Image (cartoon, helix red, strand yellow):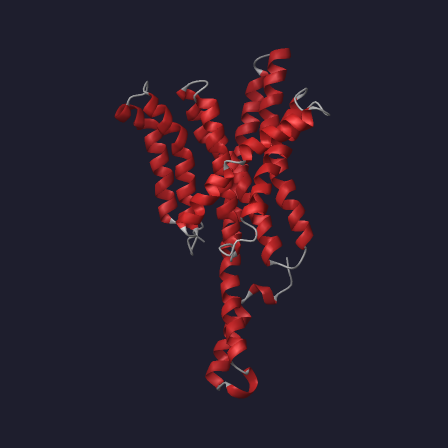
Amino acid sequence: MNIIKKPSKLIFIGLIFFAFFGNTIIGIDTPLYTLFMTVLPVLSLGLAIYFEDEHPEPIKTVLKVFALGTLSIPITLLLKFIVSLFFDIESTPFRQAFFSAGVIEEFSKWLIFMLFVWRRKEFDEPFDAIVYTGIIALAFACIENFMYVFSNSVEVAYLRAIFAVPGHFFDGVTMGYFLAKARFHQHAKWRNFILSLLFPILLHGCYDYILMLGNQLSQEFNEHIYIIFLILFLWFDYKLWGIAVKFLGRLKIDNNIYHQEQVLNEFDATHTIDNELGDDDNDYYNDIKNESPHNTPNQ
């Protein structure tokens, strides 16, 4: 099954091309190139997830959700300030990775989704959840990019384009996957609600913890230790890509099932299957219904 559609593949190729050759086109020492590299990964992943949707969301709604998603940054800063009054969330790599970054940042994104997307009429099929959580995550990553890149150098933009921005996006994909399950599947509704927050927190926390712990141990003992943690980090990042692609594929299947069931429901509402349909219509109805995985036990 070809999970990733051609437009998305072309966007990723464009991202890689401009990351390597954009400096010769614009000029590496210019503020314009720094701005370009800060926004490029966010724009590329945003367009990619938009084109992955078989029934694209209204562009006005997507832009509105992106704008609202930037509010997750001040919410994060406010929550960190409040929590730090009672609990030191920066004292160890574990606390910094799982509490300061994982819990607070992912909760801020989740809160934006629940406040501004959950009840929107545009959220009407499973794949929409990944689109909107992905956009919110990219809005967070965009503002964070500006904060990091313009206070450091364009080299930071390269690293964040490859790791940090996709990392936020993939956390958003996992969040959207479980929110879609919570919205469109009555089975284990509350479990999926909990997983929609817990799963991205764990992924985000592990992502940061590997780097932070490796950095701390290399400073305390031997700088070569960091190489081991870097290899571990690259392996984990590779697995994160795999999880995101798998969840995208599963929700595409769910989307097809959902629309198939919508057709069947409309069919049931307008026809009496046993009495009013002819043999051909009954056969057609039963063929479609039997193809639906929702008629088999949940796996």
Q: Nearer the viewer, residue 281 or 112?
A: 112
Image-based side of 84 in relation to 40, left or right = right
90 in relation to 134, above or below: above
43 in relation to 118, above or below: above
Report x, y in % for residue 227: 55, 20
* Residue 43 falls in image quadrant: top left
Report x, y in % for residue 31: 34, 21
Report x, y in % for residue 81: 64, 26
Q: Nearer the viewer, residue 172 or 76?
A: 76
- Residue furthest right in the image: 86
For the point 53% across and 55% down, the residue is 126
Q: In which quadrant will I find the C terminus?
A: bottom right
Number of numbered markers: 0
142 in relation to 252, above or below: above
Is residue 4 visible from the viewing direction of this image?
A: no
Report x, y in % for residue 181: 60, 54
Is residue 289 visible from the viewing direction of this image?
A: yes
- Residue furthest left in the image: 25
Q: Nearer the viewer, residue 164 or 214?
A: 164
For the point 56% across and 15% down, the residue is 224
For the point 54% across and 24% down, the residue is 230
